[in-house]
Amino acid sequence: MFDLPLQDMKRAGDMLLDVDDTIHFELRFSHGPQRLMQVQGSLKGEVTLECQRCLGSVRQAINSEFLWGLVTTEEAAENLPRTHEPVFIEKDVLELLPAIEDELILALPLVAYHPPEDCKLPQHLQLQETQAQEPEKKHNPFSALADLKKSLKSGQ
């Protein structure tokens, strides 16, 4: 297993609050069916994201496994088994850092939240949230007609 500092990942770093963390990765190179060059790997670690509820920092565990099929053409990518993700190589060279960074980005959650009991909403948002939970009594413009109808019924 190898360690990779998040500081080296510019695109992923833009999505994170803290790039001082390290991601652990493991790669196993082999030939699959029909002499397909493949890489089986995993990513593990923790990253710091922004909580979308309170805008504070939240730690998120990352644990991802992947299977790449190394290809040189679009046609080869289309013919990969469904179990493989295509990774393009040029001049028999695999650029590992961008490929691992892509896997990290795919492993990030779409939206990061603290557990509700740990989330600290700003004071002005807490007030809005409690007000939204209390139903307001709305004035019904037709209530006068309802009163008139009741008085007509009682008058008969």
Image (spheres, rainbow, N blue to C red):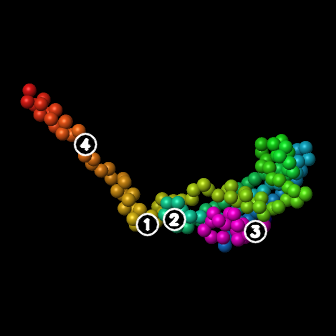
The residue located at (36%, 57%) in the rendering is 130
Sooner in the amino-acid sequence: mark 3 or mark 4: 3
Residue stretch rendered in magenta on the structure: 2-19
Name which residue lies at 90% across and 57% down.
Answer: 92
Q: Earlier in the sequence, mark 2 or mark 4?
A: 2
Label 2 sits on a secondary structure element that is: loop
Q: Residue 3 carries which label?
A: 3
Whichever of callouts 4 and 1 sits on the residue coming sooner in the sequence is 1
Q: Which of marks 2 and 4 is in front?
A: 4
Q: Using the rendered image of the protein, determine whether residue 125 is visible from the camera's viewpoint.
A: yes
Relative to 54, residue 132 above or below: above
**Dot 1 amino acid type:** Pro
Instruction: Report x, y in % for residue 105.
Output: 68, 58
Q: Which residue is labeled 4 in the image?
A: 140
Label 4: element kind: loop
**Mark nearer the viewer, 1 or 3:** 1
Residue 55 locus on image (x, y percent) = 51, 65
> Which residue is tagged 2?
55
54 shown above or below 138: below
Q: Which class describes the residues within 10 Å of circle 4: few (<14), some (14-19), or many (20+)?
A: few
Q: In this view, does 18 lie to the left or right of 100?
A: left
Q: Do the residues labelled 1 and 3 touch (CB within 8 Å)?
A: no
User: Between marks 1 and 3, how big is the CA–CA gap?
Assistant: 36 Å
Q: Which of marks 3 and 2 is in front?
A: 2
For disc 1, the marked residue is 122
Inter-mark Cα distance, 1 to 2? 9 Å
